[in-house]
Image: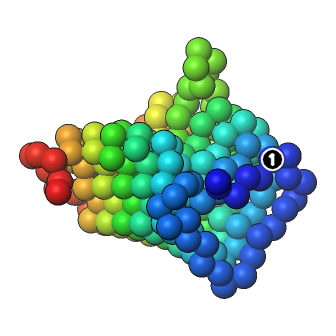
């Protein structure tokens, strides 16, 4: 199964390492504590949500110098999903070629709800690239739902695709800072094969 991180106390996983789940399961599942992923390539994940990294519970995750590439979710968040009270900082990170086949946020999905409980997630982006991601429903790049807060600085959103809504991403409560490049995507009129 996925590499499970639960109740980590400042855990750091680093190195120039490729972690490939070979489409058998999600790569990382982080359910609590503070964790940093540094220098990794996270690829080949396949899960319901968060094919590359699934963040839930009270987890606080930082990625630095990480590539999250070619992961699949059958619902939301092909590359990364953040639910419950999760916190995520992406720094010098690339989200590329990830797919959410039955939902939104091919690169990243951040939910503001957990069941009947409203939770506020925080997602910060600094010097990230979000490119070539696909969502089977909407928002190929990033789908950060209402209530998810954070900032986006020095980042590029380019060439993401979605079945229904032509946005690189949606993040109504996330602040766009300076030096961002955002390009509109192509709306696909039918299923991509």
Picture quadrant of residue 39: bottom right
Relative to residue 97, is residue 17 depicted above or below? below
Relative to residue 135, is residue 19 depicted above or below? below
- Outermost residue to the left: 189
- Outermost residue to the bottom: 16
Relative to residue 21, is residue 100 depicted above or below? above
Q: Is residue 150 left or right of residue 46?
A: right
Q: Mark 1 points at which residue?
A: 6
Counting from the top left corner in percent of width and height, residue 5 is at 77, 52
Q: Is residue 7 left or right of residue 126?
A: right
Relative to residue 96, is residue 165 depicted above or below? above
Picture quadrant of residue 75: top left
For the residue labelled by badge 1, is the local secondary structure a helix, a strand or a loop?
Answer: loop
Q: Residue at x 61, y 72 (%)?
A: 19
For the C terminus, the image quarter is bottom left
Asked whether 29 or 10 is in front, the reply is: 29
Query: Badge 1, how many Cα within 10 Å: few under 14, some, many 20+?
Result: some
Q: In this view, does 187 lie to the left or right of 116?
A: left
Counting from the top left corner in percent of width and height, residue 88 is at 65, 51
Q: Which residue is drawn at 85% across and 52% down?
A: 8
Counting from the top left corner in percent of width and height, residue 140 is at 32, 51
Q: Which residue is drawn at 65% across and 81% down?
A: 17
């Amino acid at each position: 199964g996925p590499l499970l991180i639960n109740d980590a106390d400042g855990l750091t996983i680093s190195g120039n390492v490729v972690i490939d789940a070979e489409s058998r399961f999600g790569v990382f599942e982080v359910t609590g504590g503070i964790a940093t992923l540094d220098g990794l390539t996270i690829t080949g994940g396949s899960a319901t949500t968060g094919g590359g990294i699934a963040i839930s519970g009270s987890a606080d995750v930082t990625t630095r110098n990480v590539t999250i590439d070619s992961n699949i979710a059958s619902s939301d968040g092909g590359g990364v999903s953040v639910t419950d009270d999760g916190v995520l900082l992406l720094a010098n990170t690339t989200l590329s070629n990830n797919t959410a086949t039955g939902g939104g946020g091919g690169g990243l999905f951040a939910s503001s709800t957990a069941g009947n409980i409203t939770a506020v997630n925080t997602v910060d982006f600094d010097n990230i690239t979000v490119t070539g991601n696909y969502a089977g429903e909407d928002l190929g790049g990033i789908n950060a739902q209402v209530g998810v807060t954070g900032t986006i600085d020095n980042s590029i959103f380019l060439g993401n695709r979605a079945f229904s809504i032509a946005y690189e991403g949606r993040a109504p409560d996330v602040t766009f800072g300076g030096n961002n490049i955002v390009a509109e995507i192509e709306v696909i009129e039918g299923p991509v094969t």
